[in-house]
Each structure stands twice: as C-alpha cells, then as structure tokens.
Image: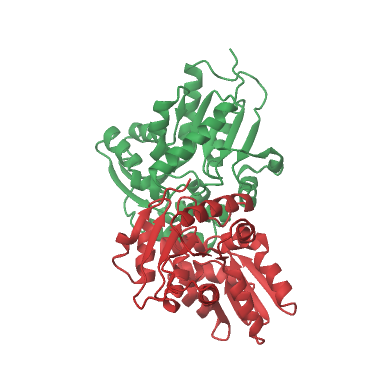
Chain colours: A green, B red
Amino acid sequence: MADTRPIGMFDSGVGGLTVLKEFRKQNPQENIIYLGDTKSFPYGSKSKESIIELTKKGIDFLLEKNVKAIVIACGTATSQALEEVQKQYKIPIIGIIDSTVQYIKEQTKLRKVGIIATTGTIRSKGWQNKIHSQIPDAVLSYKACPLLAPMAEEGWTENEIAKLTIQEYLKGFYDIDCLILGCTHYPLFKKCIQEELGKKVEIINTGEKLAKDMQKILINEQKQNESTEEGNFEIYLTDTETNFLRVASKLLKDTEIKEKIKKADVE
Amino acid sequence: MADTRPIGMFDSGVGGLTVLKEFRKQNPQENIIYLGDTKSFPYGSKSKESIIELTKKGIDFLLEKNVKAIVIACGTATSQALEEVQKQYKIPIIGIIDSTVQYIKEQTKLRKVGIIATTGTIRSKGWQNKIHSQIPDAVLSYKACPLLAPMAEEGWTENEIAKLTIQEYLKGFYDIDCLILGCTHYPLFKKCIQEELGKKVEIINTGEKLAKDMQKILINEQKQNESTEEGNFEIYLTDTETNFLRVASKLLKDTEIKEKIKKADVE
C-alpha cells in the first residue's frame, strides 16, 4: 500500500534542515512538511514548560496538514518535550536522541562519549539519562554551547570566529571516541569540529541515525510512500526571516527554495 | 507632590539592565519594575508584527503593576513597536532612539554617525529615518550585528572571540565621529568597541541619554518621586534563565539580585 501523506518535521529554526537533508537522502520518495518556529528561535535557553508548549503548538499545526508521522528535528525540543508529546498524541513521533544512542550502543568501540548541545538540552539531562540507562559502561562528557546555533543562523560556520568558538567550547574534551552533535544546527560546523578533534573521533550527525529509524517505522506500520517519483517538501515558518533563506539555500544547495517557504499561523 | 508609583522598563532580556543602571544613577529615588521577556529573547531577528505583539503584552503587564511611565529599554522594540504603542496607550512611553538623536543634533561636531544594532532594528530603519529627518547633514553608516546580544547573554564580552566578532562587525566603519550602540546589550562590549575604534570616536550609550529625558518628563508631568530614600527595583522574567542572573549580577554589581527576580505570567 502506498501512503502518500507527508512526514512532518519540526524545529525551532533552520537547524532541522540538516535532518531533512539526511532524511531525503535515505527516503527520497517521501513528501515532507517542515515547520520552523523561527518566531520563538532559539529554544536553547528556554524553560522546559515553554518548550513543551511550543512543541505542542508545532505538532498541532503539522497534524492539520495531515502528516502520517512526526520528526522532532530539534535537539532542545527532543530532550525537553518528546516524552510528554509521545504520551499525548497517537501519531508516531520520534526525536533525535534514541536512534543515536542505539547506534552507539551497537558500536562497542564507542564508549568514551562527548555531547555538545544547547543550554536547555544539557540542563534537561535527556542525553545523559538515556545513555546511562542504555549504555551503563559509557563514560560521558558534555558541554553547553549556546552560541553555536545563533552563529550557524548568521552563516559563520567556517570563519576564524567559528573556529575559536569551537575551540573554546571543545576545550574540555580530551579523550573521547565520538562526539554527538546534540543540536541539529551543529552539522553545519562539522568541518571545524573534525579539524579540532582530529580524525580519530567520530562526529555523530543525529539526522543520519534518525532517518534510518523513521524508515523502519514506516515499513513496520505500512506507511511508506511507494511512489517512484521524488517527493516534495514544503517549508513553513512562524516568522519570516532572511537568514533562514540564506542558510537553507546553502545547506540544501537549492536556489529555488524561496518558493517552497510559506508563513505559518501557529496559535 | 510625590508620586511613588514605579517606572516600568521593558526589554527582551538582560540588555535593558544597562538602561536601568544609567537610570538609577541619575534618578536614584525612583522605584522600578523591570520586565525581561526572556521567553521570547532575542527579538533581533523577529518580524515587526511579532515584536509589536510582544511589546504590547509587556506593556499590559507593567500597567497592571501600576507604573506611572514606561521605558522601552530595547533597541529592537523601540525601532519596531514604539510608534505603534505610543498611539495606543495614554501613559508616557519613551524608547531609546529620540533622546540619542536629540543629543547628536545638539553636538554639532558629531555628523559622521555610525550605528550598530540587531537585524530587526537595522531593517526597520528606525534610527536611519529619525536621523535623516532630524539631522539632514549627518552622514550615516550602519551594520546589523545579530551575534552580539546572544554573546553578551553568554557573558563573552571581553574575550578573544568577542574582540574578533567586534572587529568583524566594525570593519566597515572607517571614518566616524560617533557610534550609537543601538541595542541595549552593547554597552557590555564598550571596552572592546572603544579599543577597536580608538579614543577619537565617541561611543554613545543610549541609556544615559534616555535617563535624562525620562527625568524631564517626570518633572514636567509632576510625577517625580520626591522621597529622599533610594528606590527599589523588582525584576520580572517571562522565562527563568540562569544566564540572566549571571550577567545581571555582574552588570549591576549586586550579589543579592536573585531575590529581586520573579516569574512573570504574560499572556
């Protein structure tokens, strides 16, 4: 059976597009509705209560668009709100933590684990708790990096300031096997981060792991779009913003992206 | 006559405290209620429509606290929403632009004027239009600096990254007499900015100019608090956030500031 309904993706801004990109690589036939809550960006330093409220509004908007499953493509919303929204909604909702933790668990050589994320994500202990319960022998180190997401939105991902900021934030990570990019903006800094940590450290893009898991869910629930044509994607933003467009065109290598962006009325 | 009602101050975060600080220097007897809309911080890249909506909610909150006048201690809210809220409310409301433009107008040696501010403020042309109409012979140069406010909230105001970011943003300002700090966070970078531009350039802290104007309004309307005791201040935040506390304690040199902070329910 073919289920042509779209997948809903939710993020606070442009960062979730790194997840969209990975997802489209692995599931090119699926249609996608992406909602970026740019009006409330950044989520990183907001309270759990606020993030749950905003995430629920985002999910309600996507449900009105008749989506068949939802990806929380935002590190902060995953760590602060996923558990709550999974309880409240019947539709499959996945976030960026579980798939990555499962991957690390299976890779037995990855036990010294580093995590970088926003202040809200680190404070929520979402990653820390999941890793401790799933991989008890993992040694964790983590750091909140509140400037990286705004810096990515500014488009500074490879300049000297980005390098120094990455250096400053990664100072504490002496001896790790892998570094989880716990915010979906961070793959934009992958080059700088890899240079700083060296090639022996595996940089984990959560979008890659999540895209595989979503595929499994769609197969299990017989919700795959079996079309042989490439799927469409539409982008809704709660506030129009020029930076989104600039970063999105660069990231998706899509010069016509402007036509895919619409204003979302989320109340 | 003595009017002991408080002055209301509104900002998107911690930046407006630079205005509060200047105001208290000049008007130590006045009571102040400060509202920081940390839940929606930063305003800098939001649309005019969103900023007007948020500013009105902030003003309504302050009016419930029985304030006698309101200071919009936020560059973005001043440039995007002040005109609109001045039309809609009867209470005196002042923002950060008019007092500074009046000051520059009177200083006839200041005609090559630079402005740095958030993306929203620069895009709104609030400063540019006011200066063109009030000081037709001024030569303006301006630059949006979206990372400075989040960097101030991170507490990076004098490190190497702050210096390079300031250098990057100030590159275009070759020959100016003065630089307006068009966002209330920016006085936190005053040292770096002065070093970069040299001593000949006057750095204008809008809070200083605004504090004098508010004093005049209170005298004209006979609303001064004539108490000889030092006034109190209370801080309300729409979202609790640890960064606010850290930057606020440093800025106000007040180790007991935590006790002055309350959660605001703004709907």
Q: Residue furthest front?
A: B1
Q: Position of residue A130 (x, y in %)?
A: 32, 36
Front-most of residues A49 and A17: A49
Left or right? Give the position of A202 relative to B214.
left
Relative to the observer, which residue lies in front, B207 or A166?
A: B207
User: In the depicted view, which residue is nearer to us: B223 or B171?
Assistant: B223
Left or right placement of residue A237 versus residue A177 in this view = right
Report the residue that reaches farthest toward the left.
A137
- Please identify the quarter of the rendering in which residue A85 is found: top left
| Residue B42 seen anywhere in this rendered image of the structure | no
Above or below residue A125? Residue A3 is above
The answer to whether residue A136 is left or right of residue A59 is left
Q: Residue at x 60, y 15 (%)?
A: A2
The image position of residue B218, as x and y in percent, is 51, 73
Residue at the extreme right of the image, as rendered: B136
Asked where in the image residue B152 lies, by quadrant, the reply is bottom left
| Left or right of residue A182: residue A40 | right
Residue A46 spot, x, y in % from top left: 42, 48
Name the residue at 46% across, 54% down: B64
Location of the N terminus of chain B (image quadrant) = bottom left
The image position of residue B18, as x and y in percent, is 46, 70
Q: Is residue B145 above or below residue A142?
A: below
Number of residue marks: 0
Residue B187 visible in image: yes
**Rendered residue at 44%/42% (across/down):** A51
Question: Residue A102, located in which quarter of the rendered image?
Answer: top left
